[in-house]
Image: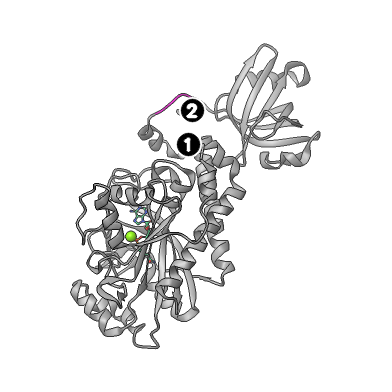
Amino acid sequence: MLVTSIRDVKNYEGKEVVIKGWLYNKRSSGKIAFLQLRDGTGFIQGVVVKNDVPEEAFNLSKELTQESSVEITGIVRKDDRAPSGYELTVTNVVLVSMSYDYPITLKEHGVEFLMDLRHLWMRAPRQHAILTIRANINRAIREFLDGEGFILVEPPIITANSCEGTTNLFELDYFGQKAYLSQTGQLYNEAAAMAFGKVYSFGPTFRAEKSKTRRHLNEFWMIEPEMAYFTHEDNMRLQERMIEFIVQKVIERCSRELKSLNRDIGKLENVRAPFPRITYDEAVDMLNNGGYAFEWGNDFGAPDETYIAEQFEKPVFVEKYPAKVKAFYMEPDPDNPDLVLNADLLAPEGYGEIIGGSQRIHDHDLLLKKIHEEKLPVEAYQWYLDLRKYGTVPHSGFGLGLERTVAWICGIDHVRETIPFARTLTRVTP
Ligand code: 4AD
Ligand code: MG
């Protein structure tokens, strides 16, 4: 018997196939049962007619409970009303395992209840759509960077260095020595860029942020390209091309998932390079003219970012922040050394900063001075300073936050649904 997946039934119209999956929902009356099946690749309806299947199979169809695992045999029929475009005329049903009292019924549940059951909630169509889009964003990122000749590198997760400030480090005892879970792979990527030219890392990063917002996780995934000989300008050009590529690939490959999330695809189609750019100074004026009392020299909060992004239809770069609100490693602006050659990319529709990037300081003495000013332990940065001693060159890079990107592209409210198992201030299980 031909075993296939729901995704591939389109290749077998009129043929009898076996689908191995789970019962998502069921309706039955008298001599007919409608089984909503899922198999991980999609959802399909199987129609069981009493006289067309063995008696045990029909009885089983009536007994099957939500999330029971089954192997269903049926003939593939085209059905334009079905979301998948196909339906199965069932010829047999075999039980793999009966599921008892599945806790997530098809009525509405509260989010905390669902997060407690995340190991099961992942099976629901909405969650399935979001995580499918996440996987396709991952794929598009890798395709883009591999296609541009980048080398994938793996920075360590346990590190003695802080990079994005010392206040949000997860500290651990490394055989009696102080170590941290990595906030970013950047410092190591800079070493790798000097060895390979263009590199990127793609891994989990950790921030012990006590923020309870819809944009913050304590463990999140970052894509961090780092490029030798790239200026701040080159850096932004690469970012906008990469974001355009990702968004257009997702539209092409995940239109069904986007529609199921009611995403306005027109807004995504509009995401084409080049993106608008404003300076930090211009953003401050924009806020003040818009009625926000924002003082020059502060960092933007979520409502500020939302207001700025709302003035544009595409993602917008905000560049040249005051050095004192940004990390120690950013190259000063030659026109005004109080500013740095950085840019944050703000997503449209209120999703806030999805990319933080900058040109890096490549002068040894200036970098050392910044390390002292930030009161960072110089010994731990000796290797990083070495990069400025042996053939230092201007270089730049950025970090794209995967979960915020997924939330934006999916058009959903909260990052907790964009990662299989979210780690937030109040949640470390399941
Ligand atoms: O702006 P950040 O802190 O930049 C860095 O870590 C740089 N070292 C990256 C680099 O240049 N290689 O973080 C980068 C991005 C943010 O724009 C945001 O999208 C995401 O990472 N991010 C978070 N996402 C979810 N939860 C959090 N707590 C996040 N913190 C940052
Ligand atoms: Mg940032």
Q: Is residue 51 visible?
A: yes
Q: Quadrant of residue 167?
A: bottom left
Q: Residue 108 in magenta?
A: yes
Q: Quadrant of residue 231?
A: bottom left
Contact check, label 2 and label 1, Cβ < 8 Å: yes
- Magenta stretch bounds: 105-109
Q: Quadrant of residue 159?
A: bottom left
Q: Residue furthest right?
A: 14
The answer to whether mark 2 is within 8 Å of ligand 1 is no
Q: Residue 388 at x, y = what percent?
A: 34, 84
Q: Is residue 203 above or below residue 35?
A: below
Which label belongs to residue 102? 2
Q: Is residue 355 above or below residue 393?
A: above
Dot 1 falls on a residue whose secondary structure is helix
Q: Report crowding for label 1: few under 14, some 14 to 19, many 20 or more residues within 10 A (C-alpha).
A: some
Q: Is residue 406 above or below residue 225?
A: above
Residue ID for mark 1: 120
**Magenta-drawn stretch, dominant element (helix, strand or loop):** loop
Q: Residue 291 at x, y = what percent?
A: 24, 47
- Image quarter where ligand 1 lies: bottom left
Three-letter residue code for mark 1: Leu
Q: Residue at x 18, y 74 (%)?
A: 373
